[in-house]
Amino acid sequence: MTTAKARMNLTVGGVLLAFWAAATYFFYAPTTALSQGEIDQYMVKVQTLMEASFVMPEGVGLDPRGLEGALSDLRSFAERDDGKAIYMVNLMKWRLGDLSFPAGADLAGSIATAQEADSAYNQRLFWDLLANHSHTAYLASAEANAFNYGTSADADGWGEIGIFRYNSRRDFFNMITSDSYLNALYLKMVSMGAVAIAPSQPHGLLFNPMPNMPVLLFFALLIGYLVFLVVSLRARSR
């Protein structure tokens, strides 16, 4: 292999590595905790969102304790910020019966089921997450008859499970207070009869959350082979 071709291969490899590093930094860059001033500003925006009549279909509320309870939970969540990534674990139940769309909803005439409304919401959420350094970590349909040890009988009936990774709580609040998210939120409210959301942070393991093992093995083997090629090329060019 000629020296020129070897240099070209190394250049291409360097460009790909730089692209990977940029993407990694975008989603996993270190962040700082929210300041009290930022929290106050976000709470004003969140309250405006929750009070927006066109977002909430008739009979749907974000919190059984009302607006004050929802805002209190979100403020506590913001004030516990340590600057680290947060994973939002969502347990969701499908809304039963006829769907109730808010006035002026753009997709009201094209959605017939709660599942279709949730699918449309997730498609919009995908781009909002990406724009705010975040992504879906896991999304799946729930099995019936959950193992509800120590819980009440009405704790069953979950329809969907979703885990979403936010690089910081700041990214989470930036997303839920954006205009694009505000215009998509009604789809979640239309589709869900109940939602339980548990913020969480990984701990205890080196690979936590654990990536897909075959994918991890593939990239480990690929990187090992590329390192072997680089070493071989350097040895031949001497």
Image (tube, rainbow, N blue to C red):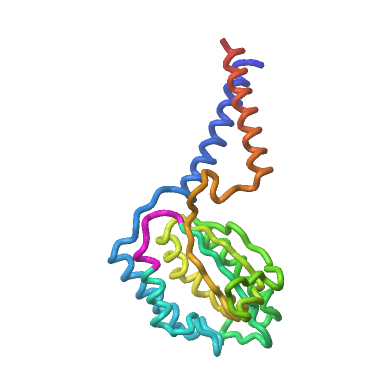
Choose top left, top right, bottom left or bottom right for residue 138. bottom right
- Does the rendering let one see residue 198? yes
Q: Nearer the viewer, residue 66 or 130?
A: 66
Identify the residue at horizontal 28%, vertical 65% (top origin): 36
Residue furthest left as drawn: 37
Identify the residue at horizontal 33%, vertical 67% (top origin): 39
Location of residue 112 in the rendering, given as x and y in whole percent from the top left corner: 71, 81
Q: Can residue 82 be found in the magenta stretch? A: yes
Q: Can residue 142 be found in the magenta stretch? A: no
- Does the rendering let one see residue 132? no
> What is the span of residues highlighted in magenta in the rendered image?
77-85
- Is 83 on the left or on the right of 191, as rendered? left
Residue furthest bottom as drawn: 59
Q: Quadrant of the C terminus?
A: top right
- Dominant secondary-structure state across the stretch colored magenta: loop
Q: Nearer the viewer, residue 73 or 127?
A: 73
Q: How many labels does the image show?
A: 0
Task: Determine whether 141 is above or below 51 in the image.
Answer: above
Location of residue 76 in the rendering, given as x and y in whole percent from the top left corner: 37, 70
Task: Determine whether 169 is above or below 93 in the image.
Answer: above
Choose top left, top right, bottom left or bottom right for residue 16. top right
Location of residue 1 in the rendering, given as x and y in whole percent from the top left corner: 66, 16
Task: Determine whether 140 is above or below 233 in the image.
Answer: below
Identify the residue at horizontal 55%, vertical 57% (top origin): 135
Location of residue 120 in the rendering, given as x and y in whole percent from the top left corner: 64, 71
